[in-house]
Image (cartoon, helix red, strand yellow):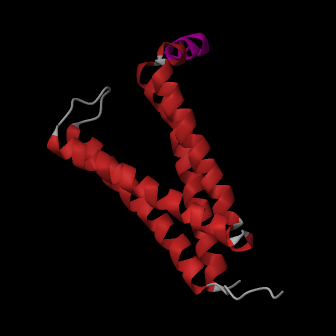
Amino acid sequence: MTQSQQRVRAASVCYAMLCVSWLARPLILAQIDWKGSWEGLFALLAMLPAGFWAIVLGQALVNGAMSVLSFNFLALHRALRAATICIAVLLVLCYAASLVAHLKHPFEPQCCASQPLAWTATVGLVVGYSMCAYLLWSAAWTSNNRSRGP
């Protein structure tokens, strides 16, 4: 396996882990108040607002798609590679902007998390997405981009 292949596989695994972490958030939030009954757990999950579900499922979908695109990155057309890298950079910029917003305008976390924990989690997301974007960019830069002929 070449170094470029290793990089795109690592980015793919990172995006897959981010996808799973987004899908696990509702269960973590519901588990905080769970009293041991499955009906109660489903009731707690049903009480989460629709906007929360839209964000969670949207982020999971984006990360899942980026995982698939990253896994097949070297086989993609040049334009699709560029689009994949642009999406990766856009994700980094979105979470960096979120971190700046959290630092400029502190907020009260919704559940049992403290403010420093929320900031640390956002920094972790920025670092994770940055690493994925860098791995994809470096794989695109070092891969064989010669023309396939006439």
Residue 75 x/y as whole percent: 74, 72
Q: Which residues are magenta?
A: 35-44
Residue 92 against residue 48 in the figure, above or below: below
Residue 9 x/y as whole percent: 64, 69
Residue 126 against residue 102 in the figure, above or below: below
Residue 128, picture quadrant: bottom left
Question: Is 60 within the magenta?
Answer: no
Task: Between residue 131 and residue 144, name the one nearer to us.
Answer: 144
At 52% from the left and 44% from the top, the residue drawn is 21
Q: How many marks?
A: 0
Residue 90 x/y as whole percent: 44, 55
At 45% from the left and 61% from the top, the residue drawn is 89
Residue 113 x/y as whole percent: 29, 34
Task: Between residue 27 and residue 123, name the one nearer to us.
Answer: 123
Residue 147 against residue 71 in the figure, above or below: below
Residue 27 in view here: no
